[in-house]
Image: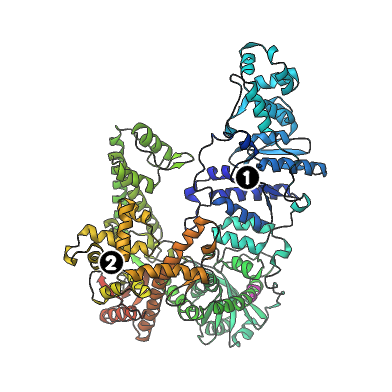
Amino acid sequence: MAFRAFFGLPVENFATSTGVPTNAVYGFTTMLATLMREHHPTHVAVAFDLPGGTFRTERLESYKGGRAETPPEFEPQVPLIREVLDALGVAAVDKERYEADDLLATYARLGREAGMRVLVVSGDRDTIQLVTDDVTLLYPRKGVSDLVHFTPEAVDEKYGVQPSQYPELAALVGETSDNLPGVPGVGPKTAAKWIGVYGSLEEILDSADDVPGKAGQSLRDHLDQVRLNRELNHLITDLEVPLTVDQLEYGGADAAAIHQVCDALQFRTLRDRLLPFANEDSTADAPDAPEEVEVVLEGAVAAVTSLPGPVALHVDGRIGADADAWALGVCADGQAWGIDLSSLDAADEAALRAWLEDPAVEKVLHAAKDAWHALISRGIDLQGVTGDTQIGAFLVNADQRGFDLEAVLQRYLGITISGGSGGGELDLGLDAPAAQAAGATAAHVARLAAELDAEVDRRGMAQLYREVEIPLIAVLARMEHAGIAVDREHLGSLADATRSRADQAAAMAHDAIGGDEVNLGSPKQLQEVLFERLGMPKTKKIKTGYSTDASSLADLQAKSPHPFLEALLAHRDAAKLGQIIETLAQSIRDDSRIHTTFSQVVASTGRLSSKDPNLQNIPIRTEEGHRIREAFVVGEGFDTLLTADYSQIEMRIMAHLSKDDGLIEAFRAGEDLHRFVGARVFGVEPEDVSPEMRSKVKAMSYGLAYGLSSFGLARQLSVPVGEAQALMDDYFARFGGVREYLRSVVEKARQDGYTETILGRRRYIPDLTSTNRQRRDIAERVALNAPIQGSAADLIKKAMLGVDAALRDQGLASRQLLQVHDELVVEVAPGEEQAVESILTDQMHGAGDLSVPLDVHVGRGSNWRTAGH
């Protein structure tokens, strides 16, 4: 069933961010959860085949030998499925020298004899023999979701025999999947007819001389094969099983274990399907759910505005261009209040505004930035935020998924609140007024804050949390609120030009194959053109044939260039660019500005992410990307845009962390890093380093920081693996500090369980000790990369805080608008350009104390492109 799930879901669409394939795990688990939800079994077991042979392969070496080689992406998923089963509390059983079907057969008998109704789920037709009035086979017709219910009547209708006679029919017909040939010329109908006439296979074989026709002669020629088939397709029903039937009784799942495995495999929607299976005792180790807090509504404003803090807040409100916050919950010292923001008189509204804007009143929220946007729509500038349970949960484990309030409450307190789409927008139902629900939620946030604050402190990230992440909330909120101006006409002309390019590329593709207008978006039609008509080398095998994804076609074009492929790739590039432009155009608001949303809780490395729209996916080094940047312009009332970014920040951090004398010397001398490294690696003078040499060492230098292997480098440079390995050996011979650092960072992470950035951001990597080799290898690459990327993220965040504070301290009207990768974009007010440039360079230089200088480049212009450098 897991194998069917593997081929039922495209492997390229199901993988963790670290590259672990999960399609079989996802499909199998979804199927199992659906079966359990529909049938409510009292006892459950999943039987596994074990590697190695069985008594059947001992009897016949070629048994099942005709099967295609198992895809390499499938094998590592089997132990992951067992992990999911363990979290679900479902027994996993196996037995040396026997197949999973033999275990199913034995358990079916034991269950039937215990008076149970048994459901067997299997994609092996041999299990049809298990069907009785008390045993039903659920057999997949397609994938793992379309299951045929085989009862005795259904078996008779389809095959014309009783279930117990099915193995006899199969012995005559043969079973291709088991590599058991049948009697030539004998199909299911003939076999069923013989069984009906003679009564059994044994009678047929005894009367073989009397069976007429060519089929009879064919039978006589293959008697030994039929007997062998029957011997091998007989399922064992009397095994000594590893667990008794009573031990298969289903007691429910472990909620904490479900969260853990779903976090590791990055399953979001599946988590929600599995949690209902959790038993009531599975959260026994979690803190006790808070008692119901009485929420005071009468006189709430007067009571709340007298609170000095610290307090927990929860804002119920719509967030967006037309935001309208309508309820506020407050909790302090175990007491909660609820306030209806839509029905305040002028005096109460003024008092509440002053209290919310008072920076001296310490406030903790969940997703505080969203609450800020909701309140600013009512003219309230939320101040004094000293904690955010969403960010706290992220710091505690950045590789978890799902940081909305409901997910975090479930994970850390073991409680559930109704509905919820996260981010300060909770549908708490119609049973209680919004104000009362907001007050109750604030009480949850208060208790959550106590749990997470202690955990953040315990993990050594209190300073990062309080001095970087929390102050950054207000900075990002103001950046999002400001947005960046956009030239609609320029964006429109770009869209037209991109459509024209796409059409032109499509026409060239069609011309390259004789004018046939194939659908360039159809994998099926592309496969027919590429691999049948053009006879091109096959790409990687997938369920529907051979891959036509971007990387596969790029490799194909590099190895076997063809005008059709060239035009197809150009068409895809134009289409992708067109989608980016269309998304940007749709994101322009009534103020002619785009207001992206930055998140501190998406990228596990700590880097900020951007969405709605994503401004980080605009190509950086292409002419098309530059043209898109031309559409982002200085807004009305401002003079210019200033951009500032770090040069080679990750390599500078590598030099600092590795303490490699050679790299440090290059940066301190202000030399071209890659030319300097190239001279050392290739043993030539710096002026003799060719562009090709420089390109190779640049790819290698950055690749090493990401755990690039010699195989990966060879593929990237299109050179033999041996040449790539020699290049790496020469590099490490001259930059030994880098080699020692890369080796030590993984070993230290394996011992500690986490990596750490310059500012103390930890990333916990439990897979470093995984028994699954693929997961362990990927975890090692994560361990190499996390300190470098994470340190870069910390530095740019510190720079943003410094720039924001300096602009405000000096009373300047200029404002930060964007942070993309290692670049800041500032909109400069008239007469402030020199002051802003000085602030940018000072604050970015001063963000970190490294053993090499931080190099900052500043540019200016009327649009994002011309302001670049």
Q: Which residues are magenta?
A: 439-443
Q: Is residue 777 left or right of residue 497?
A: right
Which residue occupies the extreme left position in the image?
687
Q: Residue at x 46, y 81 (%)?
A: 467
Using the image as rendered, state which of residue 77 and residue 427 is in the foreground: 77
Separation of disc 2 and disc 1 at Cα? 62 Å
Q: Which residue is mark 1?
A: 49
Residue 376 in the image, given as x and y percentages of width and height: 49, 75
Q: Residue at x 78, y 43 (%)?
A: 110
Q: Position of residue 177 (x, y in %)?
A: 58, 33
Residue 459: give x, y in percent of width and height: 54, 76
User: Residue sitting at 72 percent across and 28 percent down?
Assistant: 165
In which quarter of the view is residue 653 placed? bottom left
Where, by quadrant of the figure, is residue 637 drawn? bottom left
Horizontal side of 720 relative to 408 (left or right) equals left
Image check: 830 left or right of 412?
A: left
Of the residues under marks 2 and 1, which one precedes in the sequence? 1
**Element type at mark 1:** loop
Amino acid type, label 2: Asn
Badge 2 density bin: few <14, some 14–19, many ≥20, Cα 10 Å: many
Secondary structure character of the magenta stretch overall: helix
Quarter of the image containing the N terminus?
top right
Q: Which label was assigned to residue 148?
A: none
- Foreground residue, 306 or 39? 39
Reply yes or no: does residue 95 show up in magenta. no
* Front-most of residues 852 and 202: 202
Classed neighbour count for the residue bearing mark 1: other residues with Cα under 10 Å, few (<14), some (14–19), many (≥20) = some
Q: Amino acid at mark 1?
A: Asp
Q: What residue is disc 2 on?
A: 863
Q: Nearer the viewer, mark 2 or mark 1?
A: 1
